[in-house]
Amino acid sequence: MSEEDVLDLRDIIKILKKGKWIIVYITALTVTIASIISLFFIKPKYESKVSVVIVKEAARMFYEDRYTQSDILMYQKLLKTYCEIAKSSAVVDKTAQEYPQYKSEDIKKMVSAVPLVDTQIIELKVKCDNPYHAQNIVNSYAENFIEESMRVLPAGDIQILDRGKYVDSPISPNYKLNLSIAFVLGIMLSIGLIFLLEYIDTKIRTKEQIEKNINLPVLSEITPSKGLSLLSQSNCGNFKDSFFELECFKLLKNSLLLSKDTKEKKSFLITSINEGEGKTTVAANLAINLSRDSKKTLLMDLNPITNNLIKIIEGEDIFKETEFKNLYVFSPHFLKSDNYENINLEEIFKSAHKNFDYIIADMPSCEHLSFIQDVSRFTDGCIFVIKVGLVDIKEFINTKEILERTDVKIIGTIINKDINIENTKDSKVKSKKIKLFTRIERRNADA
């Protein structure tokens, strides 16, 4: 994704949909980790509490309605003072003396005093990993607090409303809360990771990227199809009756024949940024489809590392007839030369333009950019095959700018979402027993 891109809602949904498994895996991982930590690494804590109320002189006066508003305000202000007394070392140390298994520091961490808003009630709480100890400690703690408060600040009478009870259900860890937090955290982390990966991913993956960032039309998309597996399963006989009949290659042919931008063009060179993007397969199948449309077509093998074209019928002309009607093949090897610099391409293309309706040149990748520039002088346009996830956007733009500076006409692209890279390599094609005409085989035959 380039920095200039502005995402709309549809883009966001598409990105999230593409990374849905990241969301699933990371969320499941965080929830699992939270579950393990909560179950095995966090000790359960139990809480018991005592409620005490501060009254005026004696409890009976509360029922005799002798409280004034000023009394209520005064006792509410005193609550904070009593809470500090409850936390004092005097109360804590006295409680610790009753439970020698705990130090004063431990008791101080367990206890808390919380005033209830708009009341004269204080809640004394104890959190402990033993529910029995929590109950006993909080009751002792409340009694020691009352005793110390009456000694230090006898401003009123402090009475216990509710004594501490045995509670067998732990207050922590809170499994539901922990899992909920882990779930939300997992979703947030996964979404953040998805957008980070999308931001740093500069590979071409969609038609929209090509049209928006590179400003080139997409002539055809080779999409996932059962029929494409026939390339690796067939021999030469049923290959010609099945593989090239796929709809994507027919659409590519129609795009070139019927589009207002290309219908007047008769010669095309097929290339790619990297090797293994399927350009040779595309070139061969495009040529076959053109020949089946009663167009006399020449397929030119100008790729110095390619050894997989079409089985031919030997003849004396440099343009060899193939087993496909109206389809002919040219290779520099027919001229007994492996050095392209010694070949007069201009004369060959002049002859080709005179004798054929369409010319398809299978070119090397852009590692041989100067050769592509040389051949482009004799063709009407250049078509790039782009393997999804293999080509960097900036690299493609740089290559496009170099070619356009030398007047190379790039008429469009073909997105390859299906042809397996391995199936386009020489070793794989040979291993599948597709009968291919190679320079090595010709050299052996000549010998």
Image (cartoon, rainbow, N blue to C red):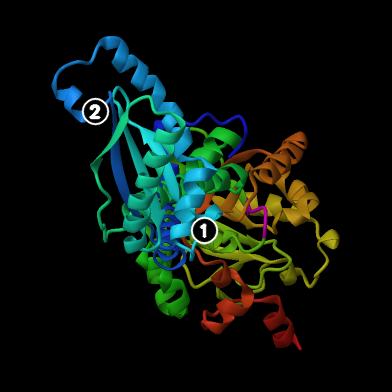
Q: Quick one: label 1, few (<14), some, or many (20+) residues within 10 Å?
A: many
Seen from the viewer's position, the closer of residues 447 and 57 is 57
Q: Which residue is mark 1?
A: 287
Q: Which residue is mark 2?
A: 58
Seen from the viewer's position, the closer of residues 117 and 160 is 160
Q: Decide whether residue 273 is among the magenta residues.
A: yes
Question: Residue placed at 83% from the left, 66% from the top?
Answer: 339
Question: Residue placed at 37% from the left, 39% from the top?
Answer: 146
Query: What SS does tag 1 mark?
Result: helix
Query: What SS does tag 2 mark?
Result: loop
Q: Position of residue 177 (x, y in %)?
A: 35, 49
* Quarter the N terminus occupies: top right
Seen from the viewer's position, the closer of residues 306 and 160 is 160
Number of the front mark, 2 or 1: 2
In the image as oriented, which residue stretches furthest toward the bottom? 447
Asked whether the viewer can see residue 2, the reply is: yes
Mark earlier in primary sequence (2, 1): 2
For the magenta stretch, what is the residue range?
Answer: 270-274
Seen from the viewer's position, the closer of residues 231 and 99 is 99
Q: Position of residue 343 (x, y in %)?
A: 81, 60
Q: Amino acid at mark 2?
A: Ala
268 to the left or right of 35: right
